[in-house]
Image (tube, rainbow, N blue to C red):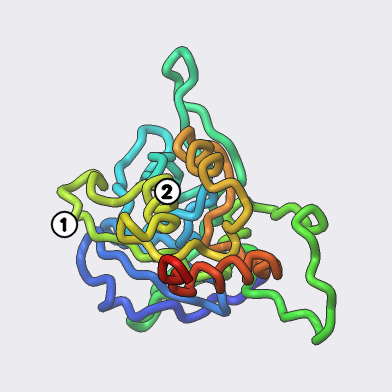
Amino acid sequence: DGAPFEFAARLDQLSRDDARLQVEVRGRHLMLLRRGDEVFAMDATCYHMGAPLLHGDVEDVPGHGACITCPWHHYQISMTTGERLYQDMTMKTCTLPKKQRVHETKTDAGAVLVRLSGGGKPPSPPPGTPRPKPHELPKPDWESDRYAFKAPPPSQGRQASGGRGRGVPRSGHALRAFANPAAGGTRLHPGLRGQGVGEMVAHSMRGGDGKAPWAMRAPIPPRVRENVAEEALPSPPRGA
């Protein structure tokens, strides 16, 4: 598409097979992975529900090459085309296009260079521009575009998870912990307040498309602010 190749990393940062690195190029968050003599680059956050792909399992699928598996809902994505792979009722492997952006790479003089597909982060609107409502936002050309310019959530290494991503929390578990301080989570993200967390968790665990909490930037309504302030106040003593 005529876009230039840009520096993404030093090649010695990917010196061994299966080495991985998360980088940012012009505001776009990418995951680099070395497989043999080839370096792959793709958007770092899964298009489906915002999972970090950095430590996803990678395997060669006949006819599709190297494919990475999302650690949350186990969606399998081609690292060459960005298509999602799935099996139909006859166990035939089928694909869905334009899911995860992949980016052309090359190595030169000890550097890994990337040609961004879809470009870098767009400029911010002028001050005072009204914030568009969700239904007013343009539909992304590729589904991973909606997460591409936000840092992905923390990713656990496979060594800590016992392999195959078993120790990596799936999105429903992450949302529950995020919303439940008693379970070790923090106070509910502003973007989830009043959004039906239970329904979102159930929808997510069924593999439905949605929006991850760290991708939301919704203002806290005034009434919610009052509720939060009231919750922070100590209860009055009995008889007061």
* Residue 174 in view of the camera: yes
- Quadrant into which the N terminus falls: bottom right
Q: Which residue is situated farthest in the top direction here?
A: 90
Residue 176 on image: x %, y %: 41, 50
Amino acid, disc 2: Ser
Label 2 sits on a secondary structure element that is helix
Residue 119 on image: x %, y %: 64, 70
Crowd band around label 2 with a 10 angstrom C-alpha radius: few (<14), some (14–19), many (20+): many
Amino acid, disc 1: Gln
Instruction: Give me the residue at 45% from left, 44% from top.
Output: 77
Crowd band around label 1 with a 10 angstrom C-alpha radius: few (<14), some (14–19), many (20+): few
Instruction: Give me the residue at 17% from left, 57% from top.
Output: 160
Spatial separation of the CA atoms under disc 1 and disc 2? 20 Å
Q: Viewed as shown, does residue 145 lie left or right of 57?
A: right
Write down the residue under mark 1. Answer: 159
Instruction: Using the image as rendered, state which of residue 234 and residue 205 is in the foreground.
Output: 234
Instruction: Using the image as rendered, state which of residue 6 and residue 174 is in the foreground.
Output: 174
* Residue 38 in view of the camera: no
Instruction: Give me the residue at 45% from left, 65% from top.
Output: 187
Count all numbered tags in the image, as a single digit: 2
205 shown above or below 213: above
Instruction: Give me the residue at 78% from left, 80% from top.
Output: 125
Instruction: Using the image as rendered, state which of residue 11 and residue 136 is in the foreground.
Output: 136
Label 1 sits on a secondary structure element that is helix
Numbered label attached to residue 171: 2
218 shown above or below 111: above
Sequence-first tag of 1 and 2 = 1
